[in-house]
Image (cartoon, helix red, strand yellow):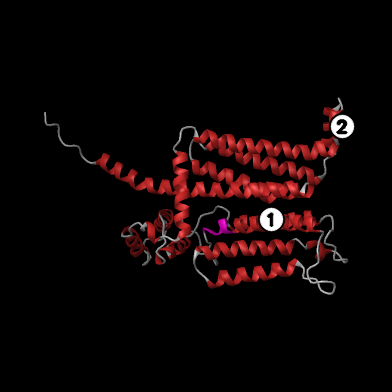
Amino acid sequence: MEPKRRLFVRAFEAPDLLELFLVASVSTVLIVRLALHLTGYPSVGGELLHFAHVLWGGLLMLGALITALSFLDRPAMQIAAVAGGIGFGLFVDEIGKFVTRSNDYFFQPAVALIYVVFVVVFLIVHTIHRPRKSTSEEYLLNALKELQELARGDLDMREMERAQEYLSRSDPAHPLVAPLRSTLERIEPLPWLGLPAWRRARSRVSGIYRRLASARGFDAAVIAFFVGQLLIKLAYGAMLIFVVGLGWRQVLDIRFVGRVAERMVELSPLEVAQLAASGLAGWFVLMGVVRIGVSRVAAYRMFERAIVTSILLVQVFSFYSEQFAALVELIFNLTILAFVRAAIAAEEAREAEAKPSMARSDAVSRLPRPPDSR
């Protein structure tokens, strides 16, 4: 049964862009607070004026909005997501000034309020893009959006595969569906020199990944890496809560186990939330480990969720406790996130390339065999 026509048509690529927006926002808050701490909270504008960074945040959000409304291509949308995320991070970082009569940037609950804002934004995004049956109109319009890259001569195999899938789920009676399918069938792969420089660089990275992924023991190495970094993060979080919270004298005491039990009871809501967020990231890593033998893409998606959870949730609490260490961890997480997304793109491209060959082999196997000459 076809779902009812909706007032707004969802963009299927929006969750990735909104996730990019959130990562940029959280990263901006962490970096700004550390930079201000290290520089002694300077005043930009001299003794008379003060150009608060909320103003620069507003300008960046304005620039992101103008970019999103002015251009159609995917790189422009990604730039708008990053610029808007940085601008929103600069804006929400000064929330302490907005909720206190004294305009107190150092308002103690400000970090918790910032966290609540990010969680609310995350829930709104999740509500809009929660799994549900899409309409044929949504599939057709998203197929047309994928084909925008065709007009620029920049349609890769993964984008073509998505367009074909969306068209297969569109209303076949629509006058655009058949011509678009016919157009896709006539498309030849783009020559290497015809690709932009950033696409050629991505293709090289993809080639390096494929060589590594074909090596024996690659999956085991991936599992060891993500489980290892998870254990290190959990150990670090436990050290912040228990070792730093109790003090080294208590740690060296023979009654340390009893002290830890008492500390568990005395955990603040912020520390409980930090442990819960770390546990959620750990659950995603565990799910990735379980799925890697079945589908690398599914496993990498779980690892990606673990990293995003760490950036959006765990990092905020870590920054509240240890600013410099949290910034180092943020840089590490962003680097790993970039590699995981590159691996997902490479695996999806490999699967898209494998489908036609599999279809051909299936067709050959179904051909009638010649009679036995004997």
Q: Is residue 35 left or right of residue 218?
A: right
Residue toward you, 174 or 292: 292
Magenta: predominant secondary structure element?
helix
> Which corner quadrant of the image does residue 176 belong to?
bottom left
Q: Residue 77: image x %, image y %?
A: 55, 64
> Which corner quadrant of the image does residue 373 belong to?
top left
Choose the circle earlier in sequence order: 2 or 1: 1
Location of residue 109 with respect to 318 vertically, above or below: below
Q: Residue 40: image x %, image y %?
A: 82, 59
How far apart marks 2 and 1 lie (CA) works out to 34 Å
At 65% across and 68% down in the image, what residue appears?
61
At 50% across and 68% down in the image, what residue appears?
72
Range drawn in magenta: 12-17
Quick one: SS at disc 1? helix
Question: Disc 2, disc 1: CB below 8 Å?
Answer: no
Residue 294 forms part of the magenta stretch = no
> What is the three-letter code of the residue carrying label 1?
Val
Quick one: SS at disc 2? helix
Which residue, given by chain and number where applicable, does mark 1 sit on? 26
Quadrant placement of the C terminus: top left
Q: Residue 344: image x %, image y %?
A: 50, 47
Q: How many marks?
A: 2
Residue toward you, 272 or 36: 36
Q: Is residue 306 left or right of residue 291?
A: right
Q: Could you say which disc has been placed on residue 250 in the image? A: 2
Q: Could you say which disc has been placed on residue 225 in the image? A: none
> Which corner quadrant of the image does residue 29 belong to?
bottom right
> What is the three-letter code of the residue carrying label 2?
Gln
Location of residue 76 with respect to 339 vertically, above or below: below
Q: Residue 316: image x %, image y %?
A: 73, 50
Q: Residue furthest top?
A: 254
